[in-house]
Image: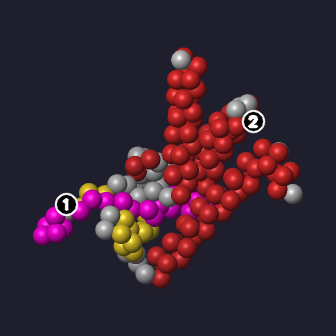
Amino acid sequence: MLKFILKNKNILLFAVFLTFLCIDQIAKHLVMQVSLASPNFIYPLLPFFNIVFVLNDGVSFGIFANSGAKNYLIITASFLCLLILYFLYKEQKFANKFAFCLILCGAVGNLIDRIIYGAVIDFLDFYIKTSNTTYQQYHWPAFNVADSLIFVGVCTLLFYDFLRKKIILK
């Protein structure tokens, strides 16, 4: 069975898609359940990392937050998912197919949140503490597993393209 899956790359990509989508949705569900039991939920894990609960009704970095553009964002995200699916279908190179699979998984994960909750659930909070006395902190905007998948997919596309050009041009 494993040999069949490894030979058929589309089944492998579908398994990767489902696995990461489940991880994303389960993580968001768990964080949401804990935050409902404990309002203002912040769980420090490392000196630079917390688990938090944030509902982001905007897009990246909170752009369009509180704009009331829920339906517009759902339509736009749905169109982008279909566009990514098209690129995934047309792509021939497995590295690029894998990258598009990760991007699609992240986009679908966030789209599911937007449809169900009207916002995306973010919970990964990285920050820098500058001083113990003033306790001043600089936080990166909270994000989630789906956002990470999109980032890794885009980096994979860029890195693979960069390596291909370097090898071809030599």
Mark 2 Cα-neighbour bin, 10 Å: few <14, some 14–19, many ≥20: few
Where residue 83 sits, quadrant-wise, is top right
**Image spot of residue 6 (x, y percent):** 79, 49
Q: Return the residue at label 1.
A: 130
Q: Nearer the viewer, residue 126 or 61?
A: 126
Q: Nearer the viewer, mark 2 or mark 1?
A: 1
| Left or right of 166, for residue 47 | left
Height in image: 40 above or below 151? below
Camera sees residue 83? no
Q: Give the range drawn in magenta.
A: 110-135
Residue occupying the point 45% across, 64% down: 123
Inspect the image, locate mark 1, and give the three-letter code of the amino acid beneath it: Thr
Residue occupying the point 64% across, 57% down: 20
Residue occupying the point 70% across, 37% down: 94
Q: Which comes sooner in the sequence, label 2 or label 1? A: 2
Residue 89: within the magenta?
no
Mark 1 Cα-neighbour bin, 10 Å: few <14, some 14–19, many ≥20: few
Q: Real-space Cα distance between discs 2 and 1?
A: 47 Å
**Image spot of residue 154 (x, y percent):** 54, 39
Q: Return the residue at label 2.
A: 89
Q: Nearer the viewer, residue 81 or 100?
A: 100
**Image spot of residue 85 (x, y percent):** 70, 39
Classify the position of the N terminus by image quarter.
bottom right
Q: Do the residues labelled 2 and 1 touch (CB within 8 Å)?
A: no
**Image spot of residue 124 (x, y percent):** 44, 62
Inspect the image, locate mark 2, and give the three-letter code of the amino acid beneath it: Tyr
Residue 117: within the magenta?
yes
Q: Which label sits on residue 41?
A: none
